[in-house]
Amino acid sequence: MRVYLMVCCLIFYTVRGQVEYSIAEETEPGAPVGNLAQDLGIDATRLPSRRFRMITGSSKQYFNLNASTGALSVNEPVDREEICAQEPTCSLNYELVLETPLELYKLQFKILDVNDHAPTFLLEEYHVNVAEFLAPGVRFTLPIAHDLDEGINSVQSYILSPNQHFRLEMQTRGDGSRYPELVLEKSLDREQQAVHRLTITAKDGGSPQRSGAAQIVVTVLDTNDNVPTFEHSVYRANVLENSPRGTLVTRVQATDLDEGQNGEVFYSFSNSTSPELQKMFSINSQNGEIKVNGALRVQKPLLEMFIEARDKGVFGMSSVAKLLVEITDVNNNAPEITLTSLSSPIPEDSLLGTVVALLSITDEDPGENGKIICKVPVDIPFQLRSSFDDYYSLITSDLLDREQVSEYNITVTASDLGSPPFAIQKALWVQIADVNDNPPKFLNQIREIYITENNKPGASVFQMLASDPDLGENGDEICKKYFYVSLPSSRLDCALSVWIVSLGCLPPSSRSLFPDQVLKRSQPRGARPTSPLTPGKPSGNSTSTSQRQRHPPRKEGNESSQAVLEGRRGEAIAAAGQTED
């Protein structure tokens, strides 16, 4: 088992690279594959907090990821032939997502072929009609064997059972594929032997080697010395992938110089044509018309079929032509948007370029019909940035202000380049989290407050109103705001204590000042204390403060006043004192 770690230099920093693993198909469940934490150089102790996880579009979970250790193991045996058919390479692709910070890795599991299939023929028995007295060297095309394995594990050779009249030769088509031919070495005499039974065996190159066999029944017939001949050895045609049943693809034609039944030709698919294609298309045996017979759901845009023309003579001579059908894609698939990760709410003081969401946007159409254009509205402080393959990141493109806009309903639009184009939209709801970025503001106008001496402790002196657009402890939350009245001069030894009004006793953002004992006239007057307003708890890490001067002359009495400087949690506060005589 080999592990490859490929670190790519990408445009967007959240996509870090690609990890490749190689594993043999049919590996038993529980078998170890690798350790992503080690291969990516990630501290395993941080994996749970980073929500370490794999994402795949497959309905089957072939691999297990231990989110605590990063260990990868086989969860379900992989059948390479099931997921990749006869592709030369086979791989399963996953995405690995880590959060805080958001990172994306691409995982590729290369599935190695093992020789777990033997070559097979479509039929157990094939019939070949050979006219007697034909000269040696005449060739007859034989069926090919199919092997679901790839490379050296697929069909490598054919063997013909020993006999006196035929030998086996391999031929190569223009596309490089090979097929067996039965070559007549010695003329046949129907009177001596009317039927010859041969065995053709196909072998693969795996270890251990596997093989499959079929019977070739050669019937010796009377002379039919002309073979049907196609107008072209290779036919080419195009058809739209959404063509309905009955659509004409093309028409092939072969001629036979013989007369009568020996010159009449009928058409069929050769045994070399896969059963799947024989279901997708039909052929008229009389005129050679080939039509669509079913849904054209194929992985390859170019299909290869083989058409056989056989005469109706007693000898049944035949020839084969190749038909290449190109499936033209139509824009019949809309893009798909998958939300991989979303961070909401985000702080209003987030830096430009902060990643908010990660999306995967795909289109199953090939070529231009599968190319995608993605966008978000231009009047919002967000933009999309292509990060890796089909992935896009939604990032901040301007400063945020919760007091202006507290949430965004962002519509992501993806449209392809087909004609007509298909488009799809997905809504993302992003909330903006408050930070303490606004100072409170007094709503009262500056005014003088007159205080009567000999007042009772606890009597209200005056009321102040303030407002703060921030939320919670950063803003107008009642009973979590504190007023402080400070003295401008140390000569004043009288003050008013500030009390916090309990919930519900005053409207939000309003507070009153109360003396905690009787004020006396004998103290200096005309003091002008200021009233800093501090939002949040005084012990908080960051506060914003507003100040407004108060001028509280005290109405004259015959008593001296005294002031008490009182603080909350170590904060110095003071209240208005009396004026001098």
Image: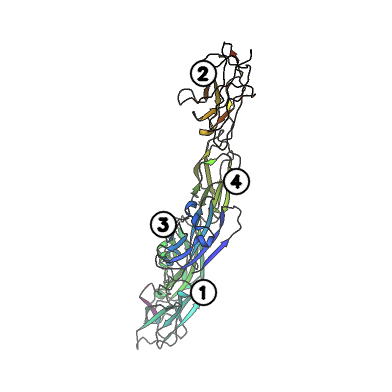
In this orientation, which residue lies closer to the viewer: 120 or 558? 558
Identify the mark at residue 328; answer none if there is no mark: none
What amino acid type should be assigned to the residue bearing mark 4?
Gly
- The earlier-in-sequence mark between 2 and 3 is 3
* Residue at 35% in and 87% down: 193
Q: Magenta stretch: residue 126 in it? A: yes
Which of discs 2 and 1 lies nearer the camera? The answer is 2
Q: Which residue is mark 1?
A: 173
Label disc, if present, on residue 460 of the rendered structure: 2
Image position of 214 with respect to 13: above or below:
below
Res. 256 visible in picture: no
Q: Who comes first in sequence, dot 2 or dot 4?
A: 4
Point 53% across, 71% down: residue: 175
Q: Does dot 2 land on a helix, a strand or a loop?
A: loop
Category of crowding for the residue at label 4, using alpha-carbon neighbours closer than 10 angstroms: few (below 14), some (14–19), many (at least 20): some
Do tag 1 and tag 4 residues touch (Cβ < 8 Å)?
no
Amino acid under label 1?
Arg
Report how far apart the C-alphas of labels 2 and 1 lie in the structure: 105 Å
Report if residue 112 lies within the magenta region.
no
Q: CA distance from mark 2 to mark 4?
A: 52 Å
Q: Find residue 121 and report its image quarter.
A: bottom left
Who is closer to the viewer here, 186 or 93?
93
Who comes first in sequence, dot 1 or dot 4?
1
Identify the residue under disc 4: 353
Q: Which residues are magenta?
A: 122-129
Specify few, some or many for label 3: CA neighbours under 10 Å numbering under 14, 14-19, or 20 or more: few
Q: Residue at x 54, y 28 (%)?
A: 482
Does residue 140 appear left or right of residue 39 in this picture?
left
Does 96 appear above or below 324? above
